[in-house]
Image (tube, rainbow, N blue to C red):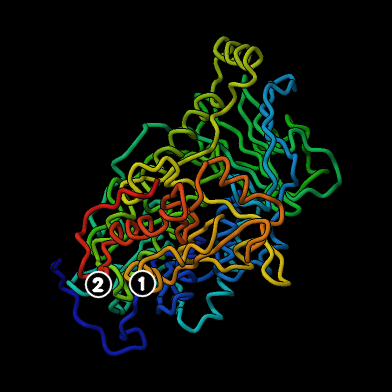
Amino acid sequence: MEQNNDHPEPPGDSLAEPWDVLVVGAGPVGLTLSLLLARNQHRVLVVERWPALYPLPRAVGLSNEARRVLNLTGVTEPLEPHVLWEPEGTSLNYVAPDGEILFSETMPAPARAEGPHGGTFNQPDLEAVLEAQVEAEPRIRLLRGHVVTDLQQHDDGVRVWFAPSDENGGARAGAAELACTAGFVVGCDGASSTVRGLAGIALDGDLEFSSDWLVVDLKPTVEREWFPYFGQILGPPRPVTSVPAGPGRRRYEFMLLPGEQKQDMATDDTVWRMLAERGVTPADAELVRYAAYSFRACWAQRWRQGRVLLAGDAAHLMPPFLGQGMNSGIRDVATLAWRLDLVLRGIVPLDTLDDYAGERIPHVEQMISTAVMIGNILCMVDPEACAERDRAIRENPGDGPPAMDWRMGTDSLAAGDAYSGRLGRQGLVRVGDQEGFFDDVCGMGAHVLLSRNGDPLASLSAPVREAWERLGGIAVHVGPHAPVTDLEGGYAAWFDEWDRDVILLRPDFHVFGTAGSLDGADALVRELTQRLRMELHDTASTGAWPTARN
């Protein structure tokens, strides 16, 4: 794909050599993607418009799934002191204006990485940890203080121009441009994505939800009880969110009422007045930051234009009522990174990247729809409507917020499998004298073929096994007396619950498909290779879709 471009070529510089991937944006999503790619030996250039880390809080929720992805990047130990992991039994409470708890949802144990809940953090701390890891990785170069100005696509790569940025994040007037070539460009550059605009992609999926909120971050200075510790205070008069925001931090979010303007409400006096209504004064806490936001619900219906792709807020925006905005961006790059790796290594063709959006967009749409549904409940301020809502919750306490059990798009997964697209589980295992969670003991970031009835590798035909090895797949027999010992019975329970003997997991921890017996493992892996458009070294193959997985 060619695009007209009038840029003169800049003089030679250290960026002129080809890069495998150019990542635009050095937030958590872009930094995570760069580390995932470098983990597979790819050279990555990260370009960020701001000259230094942004020092103020933004995202605060870190899901178990995102934590599992971040573990792949090597930041587990340095990140740990900066995350407040909620203990098992922590409740998310929905509270009436008079303090009555209308609904309480208990969060699962954080270590299992099976659900959306996890911990809270301060985003500058996360970014600092990720950036330190990036700086220590020789395959990544981070170029701060530069903004992308244009790009030109070719059959085998993308030529990208960028210039030093000014104090507002735009291109500095009169500054000399730099240029480089990359195999792919990924825009992780946020809601006002330059890359999205240059690629001609619009945020054209929209649920037409908009709500203005004042977000306030605090550092408590005294020991005290916070109520709700983790929850939503419903209206009337004003809906409020109260949550931890990492070790030693709290966040309040106040909905702006009709007639209140963002620019008028974002003042010290207004913030302390609102906090006082929640029993918080300057004697209790230090004010770190406040900002007024318009929460939106929209997404791009295309995430790829040739060799240019989008991830994170560049691809979707969601209200924060589920705490899944940044986590969704981490999911994006977990899915994208392994596909880019296979394309860059020549194992699968370029058009395999079409499936990235096909998998992620349905997942994001479900998540945004759920967030909007909850937002419509939380944002009520009409007294009669609020009273009816509260009455309905009291009478039907089991009909609380919808379960956060989302499924990715399945067109590129095992056909007709009820479990494809679900988030895979992990439990405690032992191999030899080593015990720990599966990822740490058996390996992570690869395709994993799990079986409870024997070595699944032995069930693969020669061409399928050869393809599995090209993918770098791991085959595991897990059970109470298997080579990989199921210490707590979690895997046995998983196989029993689904009534399956084989489960095939992808590098992003999601289920590709399952088989009802060990004999079905070959057909399952063969279908994976066909979905990935891989060539099997099998002259006898008919190319027909397998039908013998059950």
Task: Residue 266: give x, y in percent of width and height.
Answer: 58, 41
Q: Would you identify the image quadrant in which residue 91 lies?
A: top right
Query: Does 385 sit above or below residue 133?
Result: above
Q: Which residue is mark 1?
A: 22
Query: Residue at left 39%, top 72%?
Result: 146
Query: Residue at left 19%, top 60%?
Result: 542
The mark total stands at 2
Left or right: 14 with respect to 543? right
Q: Would you identify the image quadrant in which residue 42 lies?
A: bottom left
Towards the viewer: 206 or 509 = 509
Q: In terms of secondary structure, where does tag 1 sit?
A: strand
Determine whether label 2 and label 1 are within 8 Å by CB.
Answer: yes
Towards the viewer: 356 or 263 = 356
Disc on the earlier residue, 2 or 1: 1
Q: In terms of secondary structure, where does tag 2 sit?
A: strand
Left or right: 353 with respect to 468? left
Query: Does 92 sit above or below residue 501?
Result: above
